[in-house]
Image (cartoon, coloured by chain):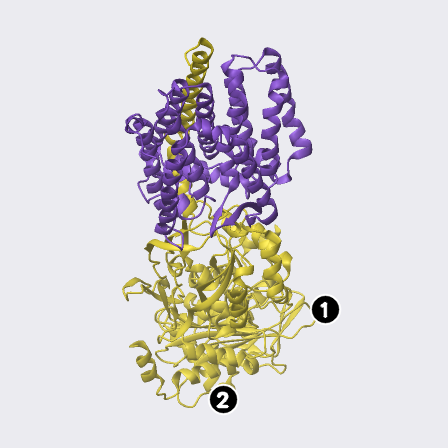
Chain colours: A yellow, B purple
Amino acid sequence: MTDEAVSGKFKWCTLILVITMTVLLIRLWDLQIMRGSEMRKLSEQNRIRVKKILAPRGIIYDRTGKVLADTRPSFNIYLTPEDIKDFSQSVDGLARLLNWDREDVIEKMKAASGMPPSFPVKIKSDIPMDEVARVEAHRVYIPGVSIQIEPKRNYPYGASFAHVIGYVSEISDEELKNRKQSKEYSPGDYIGKYGLERAYEKDLRGTDGEKRVEVDAIGREVRTLDVIDPIPGHSLHLNIDLELQLTADKALETRKGAAAAINPKTGGVLVLASRPGFDPNKFASGITKEDWQKIALDKSHPLQNRAIQAGYPPGSTFKILVALKALDLGVINEKTTFSCHGGFAYGNRVFKCWKKGGHGSVAVHRAIVESCDVFFYNVGLKVGVDRIHEFADILGLGRVTGIDLPNEQKGLIPSTEWKKRRYNQPWYEGETVSVSIGQGAVWLTPIQLAQLSAFVANDGKNFKPQIVNRIVSTEGKIVKTFEPIVNAEPKLKKGVIRIVKDGMRGVVNEPGGTAGRSKLQNVAMSGKTGTAQAGSDKVKLGDHAWFIAYAPAEDASIAMAILVEHGGHGSSAAAPVAKDITETLFKVKTVIKEANAHENR
Amino acid sequence: MRIDKRRLYHLDWYLIINGLIIFGIGLMNLVSATSSFSSGSYNFMIKQLIAFALGLILILVVMFYDYRVIAGQSRWIYLGGIFLVILVLIIGLAAGGAKRWISLFGFSIQPSEFMKPILVVFLANMLYEKKRQNISLSLKDVCKPLLWTIIPFILIVKQPDLGTGIVIILVCFAMLWYVGLKRSTYAVLFSVGAISPFIAWHYLMKPYQKMRILSFINIDADPAGFGYHAKQAIIAVGSGRFLGKGFMAGTQHKLQFIPEHHTDFIFTVFSEEWGFIGSIVLFALFISFIHRCLKIAMDAHDELGSIIAFGIASIIYVQFTINVMMAIHLAPVVGIPLPFISYGGSSLLSMLASVGLLLNISTRRYMF
């Protein structure tokens, strides 16, 4: 076998072998050397899934250590796109199994389309046990579907705290976009949307942990590679008192209104109730479209926190402020009297007093006790609108009080400057007459009037209202304590506070006092009623009932403002709420011990 | 009959040791490739070793008879092979949508694997006279061998086992080329070769086979199906980088990202765990083995032995090249085992029988 043709063929064969070897080696060089790192990364991505371990959200406690918001385990359904073999099999299968709308499932999947296919998309939160059982039993037929046990927010007192504590809900696309850089949030995460949950999101949220697991080609976990434990969120200890809050909530009952109570010595908010409310638990478990529509379109605006957002003319409660300023300025003194015949003519108009026959000749004490309008018309004119505005501003009225909740309303105390700016018109003195009794352009929120009450109660000093007392980590370490912050401590003439205090005490405790019916047995409460006209002269709506109060009359430990929208008279609609709250606070109780027991838990 | 000591001395130890090294690497690789299976890797290793033991007996049997005697009886062996291949179509065992196996004495065997060396001997017997007379084959001369190749080709492709079909066709052409063709024959064969892909695409190929071609051209055309496998295969190979992930440390196959990783895709297992270096060594071993087969063909005592040896060299070359190219996305996915490495008794037995033939030819190279 040595002829030339054959040896020629062997040369060909050798050449082919060399070419083959070269081609294969070039390709291997390309794959393993040039793109080796990239391929290694891909193989790691294949097998390693990073699973988020949700951090339990911080617990919210009341003043006495009772739980107002905590977390409980819930079952959530996830779909992992990468593990779906047949889209309609998994999606339709799941929808049919649990009687869901297939479009809802697809919508959720679409919302997370920017995430890698190995990212599990949350389809539904907090499903009931029987659905859990059904999904588990059919899991083989719906590849990609998984159930995860995750912490879920729980609000044991529901609507009673809805406005203060707020709620968490699934993060929206928009919120997610805004937080894109931080990468802390991913679709399906919960975020505080309202109230303290929103204001203290950073503290409450904690840091999610991570579990790196090895999975096989069909997504089964083979083993856990490592775990980074989640850091639970800090808990909030509030100044709010559960019992007082529930009392206020109950007293407001089915009416529209709000109650704001603060400790005048610290600014700690004891009560912040608003009615009507809503159930925050519904949001935490993924609110349905119908439920959301119901709440959002409700004409009584249950989502509004009236205690800090509802602005109404303060009515006669405002007289306290006018009296303070007038006495301080010296335009009147304790003995200055004005004569009330049931009306006050100014310009070409007659301003009426609420009491038709008039109060006769009254000095400041009786004017407060009986709420004489004519007296304050006169005083108001002497003080002037700008000095009223200036003083109100010092006390924190007509500007945000700075309470630690989002979206607080500013309220308004008019001034000549304001009118010029707003309407480009001069101020008419006739308007000052209305302002003197808390009507006209004046409007304030309950928390602001509580600040006015606290100012008097604390002898001419008030603090910034604060709901949160301290932030505590899970290990019990205090992260932050909110010390009282002085809001206003103007230098007032000696005796001014004394006069007003005596007047307010008289409102409840003296014969002829407008809130005499709300007198308490074991504690002296001071207060001032207010009945603010609502609507215009043409459309008569029910008056808004106001009551500001503090107790005990000397050395007060609670100062508050109550608003009942269209409630009628302050004395009949609002004062009883304050009475209930005060009664609850000062009843001889064994609760203190109980509270201590809770605290040591 | 006594075994001739001279023949023992003339055994091609180069070929034997080279083959044993490849088989040893294959066995070790198989342990890793099958370790994640529930039946355990030793189960597969033992089955492979049993096949190897049977293969050694087969080598002795094949070596016992002079290859000229075997070639003289090749028509009967060929008919027996065809019979088994037909039998597959009638009583074959189905697995993964294809009928490729028949159960024989409790073993399931794959007759198409044995058809490859049988066809080589049969065609060699048909052609060696022409080569001896140094006659270049005319178109008429190639018709007969082509016909005898197309019969098993059609039967095997019907199973369907396109991979083996492609191997025997390519081996047939290689042998015809080796014998020598007239220019006119070249011309006709090339033209047929040029148009046959179009005919195959339009009339013969099944949709899933077309899909494989499409996903070869564009790996993302079918990311969930064939493209996925091809992609996972190159990820496995690429992620091995220079030194590999280490024995038993390949994640791509252990976590089932690669289908058929103990049979057709076994190269990805080896390359992932042993990297560029290991792959070079394995390639070198194969090239050296094939080169040795060619040397046996060159040194054979007569044309018959030469053609048989060349045919076997081409079987090993074609299978090795296509298998590796498929694993690194240089060829479409097609079921062809890697000789000596892939798991599978029939494939190993067929290879060992071929080695028996090579040794048969090489030991008799000085006999007259």
User: Front-most of A36 and A226?
Assistant: A36
Q: Residue A538, labelled with which disc?
A: 1
Q: Residue at position x 50%, y 18% from top?
A: B178
Disc 2 packing (10 Å; few <14; some 14–19; many ≥20): few
> Is the residue under label 2 in contact with that under label 1 (CB below 8 Å)?
no
User: Front-most of B129 and A424?
Assistant: B129
- State which quadrant residue B205 falls in: top right
Relative to residue B316, is residue B225 depicted above or below? below
Question: Which residue was labeled with disc 2?
Answer: A511
Name the amino acid, label 1.
Answer: Lys
**Among all residues in the image, which is located at the extreme right?**
A538
| Image quarter hosting the N terminus of chain A | top left
Disc 1 packing (10 Å; few <14; some 14–19; many ≥20): few
Q: Residue at position x 51%, y 20% from top?
A: B128
Is B36 on the left-hand or right-hand side of A353? left
Question: Where does the image place residue A136, in percent across and percent down from the top left?
Answer: 51, 66
Q: Does mark 2 fall on the same chain as mark 1?
A: yes
- State which quadrant residue A196 falls in: bottom left
- State which quadrant residue A351 falls in: bottom right
